[in-house]
Image (cartoon, helix red, strand yellow):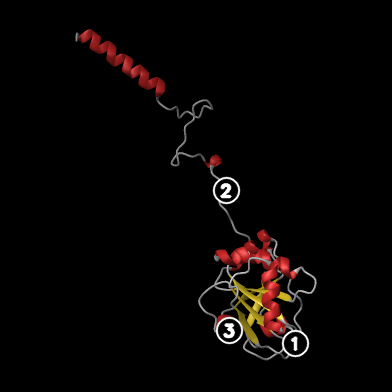
Amino acid sequence: MKPGWSLVMLALVLVCIAVLWPRTDGADSGLVTTPDTVTPAQRAPAFSPPSDAEYTSSCPTPTASGQQGPLAGVMVRCVGDASNLDLADALGNETVLLNLWASWCGPCRTEMPVLDSYASEEGAIRVVGINVEDRPDAASMVLREMNIRYSNYVDTGAIQNALAAPPVLPLSYIVTADGAVERITDPTVFDTPDQIRTAVKDSTS
């Protein structure tokens, strides 16, 4: 090939490269961004979970019940409240469905709306959630996002030992007015309110 033709071909190649090369001058018609070149305006704002104080669970005022049993003396606090209280006093003189959960537990989050639905039914026993091994802000976020209306308390570290709880979640228990505790194992995770009604009936009959 003649030297002249070589120069012509080289010039054409350079022109094609210049035309096809991505523009980085910020023009709308040609702006190309990669993960390393995303502008600050294009970045999604960093997610900041709500603080514990931004959500307060609906916890009734405890009344000293004198209730005995393994939960007497176990300290908890209502989600969104920094005050510690005796769980036995918080449960009061009534039969309660106690549910242990954590924000990082997938099955817990699956059954919480089921528990909430049951808790709203006429004739349902009181449902009380206990958040364990978790961050208070994460617990608050889950309760707020899922619009959970039954009372929820944060464990201060003793409830699992008091219940001799196995290292699994979720866990559900029936706590009677006299403080006796019975774990619900059938089913281990509630899928329907009807399952809860059956489990409660079997445990309290």
Whether residue 66 sits left or right of residue 48 in the image: it is right
Mark 1 Cα-neighbour bin, 10 Å: few <14, some 14–19, many ≥20: few
Whether residue 185 sits left or right of residue 149 in the image: it is left
Which residue is under mark 1?
64
Residue 64 at x, y percent in the picture: 75, 87
Q: Are marks 2 and 1 in contact (CB under 8 Å)?
A: no
Quarter of the image where the N terminus is located? top left
Lower sequence index among marks 2 and 1: 2
Q: Secondary structure at mark 3?
A: helix
Image depth: mark 1 or mark 3 in front: 3
Instruction: Give the tally of numbered discs.
Output: 3
Lower sequence index among marks 1 and 3: 1
Circle on res. 163: 3
Q: Secondary structure at mark 2?
A: loop
Query: Which residue is pictured at 70% across the width and 61% down the height?
Result: 147
Disc 1 and disc 3: Cα gap in Å?
Answer: 21 Å
Disc 2 and disc 1: Cα gap in Å?
Answer: 46 Å
Which amino acid, mark 1? Answer: Ala
Which residue is under mark 2?
45
